[in-house]
Image: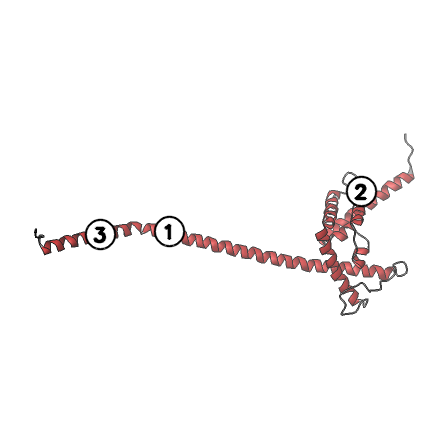
Amino acid sequence: MAQFNIDTYLRVEANAFTQDQEAERILSLADKTANPLEVLDLDSRPWLLGKLEEKDIRANYRKKSLLLHPDKCKHPRAQDAFEMLKKAESELMEEGKRTWLLGLVGEARIQVFKRKNLIKPTSSSTADAILPDPSKSAQEFNILLASVKVETRRLLTDQGKRDGLRLKNEVERKNEEEARMLNERKRKMDADKEWEKGREERVGDWRKFLKKGDATKKKKRKADGPELLG
């Protein structure tokens, strides 16, 4: 019988606890934000400096995917958490999406830095801001970081609302156009039916007109008498 190893047991239990914690962290974001930066749990550089490199995205994804892979993580929703992680990595590796997102974070950073008097109220850049030193003022640094994340969530929510409204307007315009085209087709079909419906009547009237004309000509010839032969 194999000897029970307390160190191995504690290490396995600690790893399982870390896996469950990470799965819960990612799953909790589903109802809060769709920001892939938060899902991947990247460090402060994208948030406070606007810097994000592909190698950092890959490294963070690899580290967390090893924790959350359904074959290794026993959390009941490990698959869902893993798919959210995979989607976040895919979005950030797309240059256009990454640039847009960093731009949005930049807007959030400017708003927060202005409120905290780290930049001038008229400034449109955070390049000259003096940030708190995390080694000396960890609490102040973490509050600043959290504030930028919260402001980014707000901007993303507003953007989502605008996108939703624009989509709603586009759908309504499309529906109105389809209804107009449908009514136009119906009007044309009704007109064609009315035309066909009166066709026989019009043909009959035309035939009566032609007969009446022939009869008038015959009467006129009778009234004029026979033509004289020379």
Task: Name the quadrant of the N terminus.
Answer: top right
Residue contact between numbered discs 2 and 1, judged by CB atoms under 8 Å: no
Three-letter residue code for mark 2: Leu
Q: Are marks 2 and 3 in contact (CB under 8 Å)?
A: no
Q: Secondary structure at mark 1?
A: helix
Which amino acid, by three-letter code, is at mark 3? Leu
Applied colour scheme:
secondary structure
- From the image, tell me which residue sits under label 2: 66
Question: Could you tell me residue 166's position as x and y percent?
Answer: 61, 58
Q: Position of residue 39 (x, y in %)?
A: 76, 50
Q: Looking at the image, is mark 2 or mark 3 earlier in the sequence?
A: 2
Measure how far apart labels 1 and 3 are at the Cα level: 26 Å
User: Where is residue 120 shown, x and y percent of the image?
Assistant: 79, 69
First in residue order: circle 1 vs circle 3: 1
Say if 18 sits above or below 180 in the image.
above
How many marks do you count on the picture?
A: 3
Quadrant of the rendered structure where residue 7 is?
top right
Question: What x and y, as percent, mark residue 24?
Answer: 77, 48
Mark 1, Cα crowd under 10 Å, few <14 / some 14-19 / many 20+, is few
Q: Upstream in the sequence, badge 2 or badge 1? A: 2
Q: Secondary structure at mark 2?
A: helix
Image position of 204 (left or right of 103): left
Disc number lying in front (2 or 1): 1
Count neighbours of disc 2 (C-alpha within 10 A) and say few if under 14, some if 14 to 19, many if 20 or more. Answer: some
Provide the secondary structure element on which disc 3 rests: helix
Q: Residue at x 27, y 50 (%)?
A: 203
Question: What's under tag 1, amino acid-wise?
Answer: Asp
**Label 3: how many Cα within 10 Å (few below 14, some 14–19, many 20+):** few
Residue at far front of view: 230
* Dot label at residue 179: none
Label at residue 192:
1
- The residue to which callout 3 is attached is 210
